[in-house]
Image (cartoon, rainbow, N blue to C red):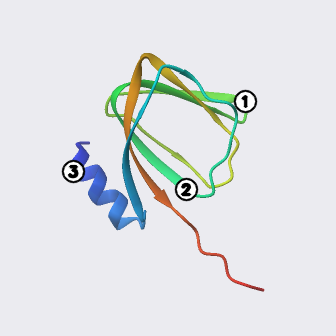
Amino acid sequence: MDTQAFEAELSRDGYQEILTRTAKPGPTPVHTHPFDAYAMVLAGEMTVTWDGGSVTCKVGDTFKLEAGREHSETYGPEGTTFLVGRRTRETKAA
């Protein structure tokens, strides 16, 4: 999938924020996000680890994480650039 098609998919699926991020090599601590994330690697590679498993994504690969999922990211030796959509789920008052 190319970046234009990926951005169109993000918009269609309700991702309100679309960003290009660049990360330095190395791991992040375990953390969560208050938004759903859907990302595509543009340069380098990254490994995302959650629930005892992991996936390594290279250029053109995509992955999704739902809001609140504990995970960590490890960016490859050259660092990583990725396009990410963020979607905040609305919560209704009880």
Q: Are marks 3 and 2 in contact (CB under 8 Å)?
A: no
Residue at coordinates 63% horizontally, 55% vertically from top-left? 67
Answer with mark 1 or mark 2, whichever residue precedes in sequence: 2
Q: Are marks 1 and 2 in contact (CB under 8 Å)?
A: no
The N terminus lies in quadrant: top left
Q: Which mark is residue 70?
A: none
Residue at coordinates 62% horizontally, 29% vertically from top-left? 28
Hey, what amino acid is under mark 3?
Answer: Gln
Name the residue tied to disc 1: 52
Which image quadrant for residue 35? bottom right
The residue nearer to you, when weighing 8 against 24, is 24
- Specify whether 10 is left or right of 51: left
Dot 1: what SS? loop
Answer with mark 3 or mark 1, whichever residue precedes in sequence: 3
Please provide percent x and percent y for residue 89: 58, 69
Q: State how far apart marks 3 and 1 are (Cα).
A: 33 Å
Q: State how far apart marks 1 and 2 are (Cα).
A: 20 Å
Q: How many C-alpha atoms fall within 10 Å of the one at disc 1: few (<14), some, or many (≥20)?
A: few
Residue at coordinates 43% horizontally, 62% vertically from top-left? 15
Q: Which mark is residue 36?
A: 2
Please name which of the two marks, 3 or 1, marks the residue nearer to the observer: 3
Please provide percent x and percent y for residue 82: 38, 37
Please provide percent x and percent y for residue 84: 41, 47
Answer with mark 3 or mark 2, whichever residue precedes in sequence: 3
Dot 2: what SS? strand
Name the residue tied to disc 3: 4
Q: State how far apart marks 3 and 2 are (Cα).
A: 20 Å
The residue nearer to you, when weighing 91 against 27, is 27
Please provide percent x and percent y for residue 50: 67, 35
Residue at coordinates 62% horizontally, 51% vertically from top-left? 33
